[in-house]
Image: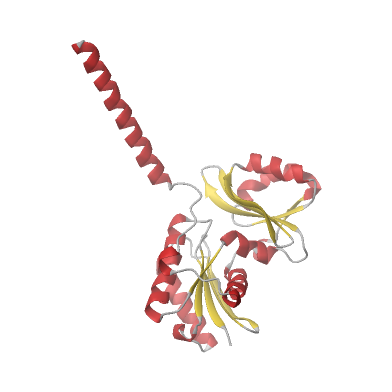
Amino acid sequence: CMRLLAIDTSTSTLGAAVIDDQGIVGSFGLASGKNHSLSLLPLLDTMLIQAGLSLDAMDAFAVTIGPGSFTGLRIGAATAQAWGTALSKPLIAVSSSEALARLLDTGGQTVCTLFDARRNEVYAALFARGERLMADTAIAPDKLARRLRALGRPVLCGGDGLAAAAPYLAALGKDFLPAPAQHDRFLAPGAAVIAAEKYRAGQFTPADKLLPLYLRLAEAEEKRLAAAARAAAEQDNNVLRDDSINS
């Protein structure tokens, strides 16, 4: 009998779910903001106690790897790595967008998953009948709206990036189908269903390969590289000025 635990820390909400051969055994979610490091373990303790289970009763651990919040993804990956190493259990990486699409798609719709990427962008992906049509992409909402309009068919859109993108996606008219908010807040059940499929197929990820999916550099890293580039350019200019003076 398979039993695995899936956790999701990719957005401002936090979730965990246990699944076995019969389906979802238990699922908890919490809108914890940015306090995942403080909230994750207490949430798991509560869920496991209520389900009468323990971590060592799991056959594998699954975690969403992004796209999503940089800090949240690091917390989720590190937690799963620690459990897998300590309990000698396999790990399963699950795409956050695939987990969300699994929750949203209840009837073979074309689905666009949206995660808040900040800086006037969203992380978007596109699915139809369970197949991926567009890779995870950091994109401006107006550009995304043009891509979706080109499809010429209704698109069900959901995720925590929907609020930022909705004013632009409204240009699709009747082809813009916003998902009910309660359907896309907590990704752990969708992640658990996908993880169970991967478990049965033997699709595991070694602990040292379980890495967050970053679609771009963190803002702090971008600023650091930009500052380094400016410093290098200034140094080159100083060298040119010195050469000019000495020639």
Q: Residue at x 64, y 47 (%)?
A: 165
Which residue extends farthest left? 246
Q: Is residue 20 above or below residue 242?
A: below
Q: Residue at x 51, y 80 (%)?
A: 47
Q: Nearer the viewer, residue 247 or 168?
A: 247
- The location of residue 139, given as percent across then percent down, is 59, 44
Residue found 67% across the figure and 47% down from its top: 166
Eyeballing the image, is 54 above or below 6? below
Q: Is residue 43 left or right of residue 232?
A: right
Which one is nearer the viewer's eye here, 220 or 128? 128
- Quarter of the image that includes the N terminus: bottom right
The one nearer the camera, 125 or 174, is 125
Q: In the rendered view, does 217 fall on the left or right side of 51?
A: left
Q: Is residue 34 visible?
A: no
Q: Position of residue 10 (x, y in %)?
A: 51, 61
Regarding residue 111, the answer to whether it shows in the image is yes
**In which quadrant of the rendered view does residue 111 lie?**
bottom right
Give the position of the C terminus as an image quadrant. Answer: top left
Q: Is residue 214 left or right of residue 150?
A: left
Total marks shown come to: 0
Looking at the image, residue 6 lies above or below residue 152: below
Q: Residue 228 appears in which quarter of the rendering?
A: top left
Q: How is the protein colored in the picture?
A: secondary structure
